[in-house]
Amino acid sequence: MSHTRMLVAVILLAVLGTIRPVQAQHSSMSTSIFNDETTFAPALSHADLDVFTRVLSMKPEEQRAMEDLYGAYCNTLKAEGGEVRKYVSDIMEESELMEDIRLLAPAQKRLGEWEKRSEQLKKSFIEDLKALLTREQEGRWPIVERELRRMKWINSGRLAGEDVDLIHLVAEMPADAKTSPALGDLLDRYSQDLDRALLARADVIDKNSEKFGDLLTSDPQAARSMYESAIKVRRALCDVNLRYARLIGAELPSDLGQKLDMDVFKISFPMLSKPSRGERYIKGAKDLKSLTAEQEELVKGIVDAYENDRLAMLHRTAETIREQQFTQLPVRLDKALGVLPPDADDGFRAYGLSADHPLARLRRERFELDKAARNKLDAILTPEQRASLPDRAADAVTFIDYTPWGL
């Protein structure tokens, strides 16, 4: 759910005291000029080359020729990009020392030109590579493009299940687990259906993202229709993943089918899968080396019962999240529609949900579940054993806001 507003508020813990804020004596701002991980890096990675090799069934000599072309592409990118980076770095230094943001304009212009040039270099590499292909390999090029789209676009999800890549998950499994005759055909159908869903999502989101902000002011009802259209294509992508996760899981050995199901859950609901403070404490008890035989049996019973209840509760929470995410609107849209007052805060607010909200009740149930299991463990562990368990007061307190903010 990477397109929700994943803001994080952190409260540092102080022992036996409070942290007093220091009164600011001045204000400051930062502006990002480029991202080293993307601006000057090759647009095609070695993982992309692996796709070429696999889909095109390249022979060793063909792979070597491709690697030579790729090396030349990377060297040119590095040399030309290095010059651009030096030019931009000099301007950034001057702008910062002179306290004048306007001095950044030449750097921003040069980076815009570099973006076009790096795209040209990538296209030249692709054209040179295609010139080496046989006619049969050329015929499979659309499959290459489909595979690359999946790898690059799959992580642009907002809804639970939108970021799942079943082809990647199955590829990570041992070869002897993928012997079902139906599996290959299933994965191919999945790849085609997923690609159509990815293209449909890109068409709606890319076409309307900029218009959405304007419509919030000029025509809130049209903005709502646009937002619902975006949710519709996102939901369709989730449905593809859900349907094929069941079909593919049925073609795997039982243990790996269960693993696939768990992997899909973890990707779909990362925060539900993250251990709570209480869970780390409870599961830590099972690993204590100082347990007596009697304690070990009691602890195992408590932890096993807790784990069964926890998993059942998490799946109920997941189903609630799935339904809630289809109807939740961005705060700005709710304000434009009059659902919320104009002065409603659309920034980060870690105030939780109303007490009667289904997710609030489930969160409270999770807390009470952890608390009850902790109390049972504390009753049978010694003070020394309890002290050696993960500290529930360690680290910072983190809040995450899942409120959608755009399409």
Image (spheres, grey):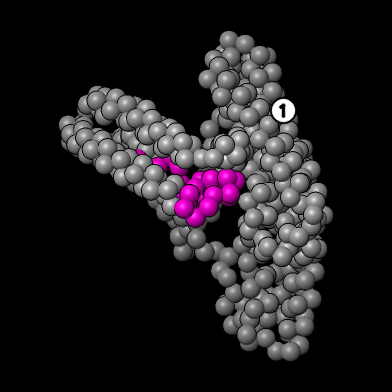
Going 68% across and 32% down the picture, which residue do you hit?
197
Going 31% across and 45% down the picture, which residue do you hit?
75
Mark 1 surroundings: few (<14), some (14-19) or many (≥20) residues within 10 A? some
Going 62% across and 77% down the picture, which residue do you hit?
386
- Front residue of this view, candidates 374 and 236: 236
Residue at the farthest top position = 218
Q: Position of residue 177 (x, y in %)?
A: 73, 63
Q: Tell me if residue 231 can be seen.
A: no
Q: Tell me if residue 60 can be seen.
A: yes
User: In what quadrant of the picture does the N terminus appear?
Assistant: top right
Q: Position of residue 204 (x, y in %)?
A: 63, 23
Residue at the farthest bottom position = 293
The relative height of residue 91 versus residue 180 in the rendered view (above or below) is: above
User: In what quadrant of the picture does the C terminus appear?
Assistant: top right
Q: Position of residue 29 (x, y in %)?
A: 33, 34
Going 72% across and 70% down the picture, which residue do you hit?
375
Q: Quadrant of residue 319?
A: top right
- Amino acid under disc 1: Lys
Question: Is 100 left or right of 152, judged from the image as shown?
Answer: left
The relative height of residue 281 versus residue 234 in the rendered view (above or below) is: below
Q: Quadrant of residue 14?
A: bottom left
Question: Is 150 left or right of 260, judged from the image as shown?
Answer: left
Q: Is residue 332 magenta?
A: no
Q: Is residue 47 magenta?
A: yes
Q: Quadrant of residue 33?
A: top left
The magenta stretch is 40-63
Q: Position of residue 64 (x, y in %)?
A: 43, 52
Q: Secondary structure at mark 1?
A: helix
- Front residue of this view, candidates 245 and 306: 245
Tag 1 residue: 232
